Amino acid sequence: MSGGTQGSYRAAMDLEFSGEVWFWKGPAPHHFVTVPDEECAALEAAAALVSYGWGMIPVAAELGTTAWTTSLFPKDGRYIVPLKAWVRAAEAVEVGDVVTVRLAVDV
């Protein structure tokens, strides 16, 4: 191999998990799903390669048949997935619902 391409291959990390939708009332209220510990460990390992600041990790997300792009937030040693209002409306998701989320991280 020549041209300096060795070691530049990037792959996607795909994760799927279920979690409960919760609401944060802070100064910018929003709905989230917390990523389970096992998946958080994998994300933490990839964070140095993909984070763009403050530990945020850009992802392609899916909930049901709805897909969107977002960034995972680090919180209390874990990561949380923000659920946009239009995603919740499209999937009829409310606080307390347990949902299955799929994430793709380009690492």
Image: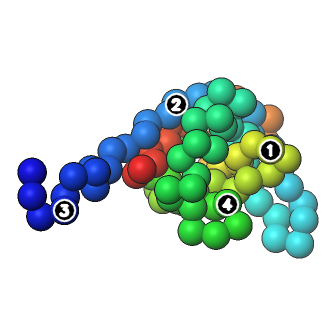
Residue under pointer 2: 16
Front one among 29 and 13? 13
Q: How many marks?
A: 4
- First along the sequence among labels 1 and 2: 2
Q: Position of residue 27 (x, y in %)?
A: 89, 72
Alpha-carbon span between mark 3 and mark 4: 29 Å
Circle 4 residue: 55
Q: Quadrant of residue 52?
A: bottom right
The one of 72 and 40 positioned closer to us in this rendering: 40
Residue that mark 3 sits on = 4
Q: Which residue occupies 58% across, 36% down?
A: 42
How far is mark 1 from mark 2, CA to CA?
Answer: 19 Å
Please tell me which residue is depicted at 50% across the width and 34% down the height of the picture: 15
Give the percent coordinates (x, y) of residue 85.
64, 59
Residue 53 relative to residue 90: left or right: right
Name the element at disc 3.
loop
Nearest-to-viewer mark from 4 and 2 = 4
Residue in the picture at 70% in, 67% down: 54
**Distance in Å between CA atoms under marks 3 and 2:** 34 Å
Q: How is the image coloured?
A: rainbow
* Residue type marked 3: Gly
Give the structural element (helix, strand or loop) at label 1: loop
Q: Mark 3 against mark 2, which lies toward the viewer? A: 3
| Marked residue nearer the N-terminal end (1 or 3) | 3
Q: Earlier in the sequence, mark 4 or mark 1?
A: 4
Q: Is residue 49 above or below residue 28?
A: above
Secondary structure, mark 4, is: loop
**Disc 1 marks which residue?**
77
| Badge 2: residue crowd in 10 Å (few <14, some 14–19, many ≥20) | some
Q: Earlier in the sequence, mark 3 or mark 4?
A: 3
Question: Which mark lies nearer to you, 1 or 2?
Answer: 1
Rounded to the nearest whole Å, what is the CA distance between mark 1 and mark 3?
36 Å
